[in-house]
Image (spheres, helix red, strand yellow):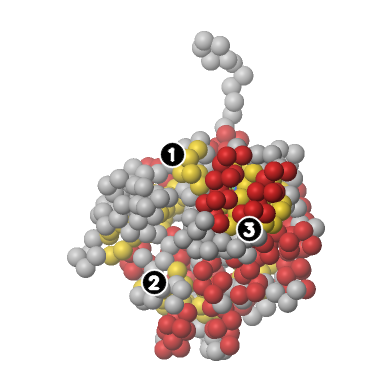
Amino acid sequence: MGEDAGLRVLVVGGGGREHALAWALARSPRVAEVLVAPGNAGTAREPGCRNVAIAAEDLDALLELAEAEDVDLTVVGPEAPLALGIVDLFEAAGRRILGPRRRAAEIESSKVFAKTFMQRHGIPTARFEIASSAERARAVLAEWSPPLVIKADGLAAGKGVIVATSREQAEEAIAHLFGGGLGVPVGRVVIEEFLEGEEASYIVLADGERFLPLPTSQDHKRRDEGDEGPNTGGMGACSPAPAIDAELERRIQERIVLPALRGLAAGRRAFRGFLYAGLMITPAGEPIVLEFNARLGDPEAQALLLRLEGDLAEALLAACEGRLAETTLAWSEEASVVAVLAAGGYPGPARRDDPVLGLDPPEEEGLKIFHAGTRLAEDGRVLSRGGRILGVAARGPTVGAARERVYRRLAGIRCEGAFYRRDIGWRAVLRETAVPLAAGEGE
Ligand code: AMP
Ligand code: GLY
């Protein structure tokens, strides 16, 4: 496997993160072809990429594909196959794959494991209680005052976290979660203190022995402008994160990333792959972990990979083989922004099968459309598939400049009922913009 040129790579997943991964891998001089399972219309049309119609959770079919196509490296995008043990399965078959094994992926797939792990290793996280029945949860509520956050234990595609600002909302959340409201049984919930502050994403690539940091980024989780409305998978992101300077980054590495990776290794859960710390930076400037993810963030990956200047295939191979010590990854000094176009109704049941128009003007350097919920119809049209449809990502000397490019391009894309936030990167832009001393008229 894996001679110097002509690598065959398989990317598992079909969202914006996976389009960005496939695009970045296809640009590596070492890569001959990128297979994407199942992919989307964007990966179907990406030079050097080919879609294969296998779902990301169909582990046996994915392994068969990797063997039949003699794939040299498999890269896993989403959390579900990791939690199902895709890495354990591929490794047992002697196939090279980047991602944490099932036990290491529990840092994301079990909130109860993640919280108790953080507590054991002194990693700063919100104060919490675990309740294994609705009755026990109500007893915790009686002693805590809102606002509170209630989280279902297993993977719930972002729908298992409820912020309750009143006791009634907290009661409803508990009835909803334990009453089967997620469509999957919930055995335990975490009840935790609500933290004020500014969120940031800190992602590293780990090989089990050491880690290579990616640039910082900031997601925008709420659906509506001004960070209002329901939580989503993420409506846009910018990189770098405005709240993290070099000194804070050092503290995040020392107090969060290192103890997490060392603690996982000590518990026979050595972590290989992308470890993502979802942080709240408190008003006092302290980083606190809201959650760990066992994968790249989406849409963060779109903004990050647009800044990548190094060879992604080489870095991912090195991470697989425990060779990160001899690897570096170069990143553009420029900032980047991605804004997501979502189908009407998202994050609830959303419109689908609408044509997506305006995708074809000539490519611009430093600007890229990453597809997510799209498919290629037989007649060659791109149709929406519900949820997040695509992300427009651009680089610029500042977040403000990158964001202007993003919105200029988005204005030319049309899809019935679809919407996007017009304020992605607003915190960064606020910090980039000079404030006049003179009061405006009427002051
Ligand atoms: P999680 O899946 O745990 O990251 O939660 C999803 C989102 O809920 C986070 O990105 C935050 O926006 C919000 N959230 C989770 N936990 C807290 C908390 N303790 N305080 C405030 N917001 C939170
Ligand atoms: N954008 C948040 C996530 O990927 O979990």
- The structure residue drawn at horizontal position 75% and vertical position 73%, both measured from the top left corner, is 267
At mark 3, the secondary structure is loop
Helix, strand or loop under label 1: loop
Q: Position of residue 29 (x, y in %)?
A: 48, 74
262 horizontally vs 50: left or right: right
Determine if residue 217 is in view: no
257 w.r.t. 48: above or below: above
Could you tell me the amino acid type at mark 1?
Answer: Arg
| Relative height, residue 354 to residue 230 (above, below) | below
Disc 2 designates what residue? 38
Q: Residue furthest top?
A: 442
User: Where residue 57 sits: x, y (%)?
Assistant: 46, 74
Q: Quadrant of the C terminus?
A: top right
Q: Say whether disc 2 or disc 1 marks the residue closer to the N-terminus.
A: 2
Of 253 and 175, nearer the camera is 175
Dot 3 alpha-carbon crowd within 10 angstroms: few under 14, some 14 to 19, many 20 or more = some
Mark 2 or 3: in front is: 3
For the residues carrying marks 2 and 1, which lies nearer the camera in this image? 2
* Disc 2: residue Cβ within 8 A of ligand 2's nearest atom: no
* Mark 1 / mark 3, whichever is N-terminal: 3
Check disc 1 and report the residue beneath it: 422
Q: Is residue 71 left or right of residue 410?
A: right
Would residue 442 be visible to someone looking at this image? Answer: yes
Q: Which mark is residue 133?
A: 3
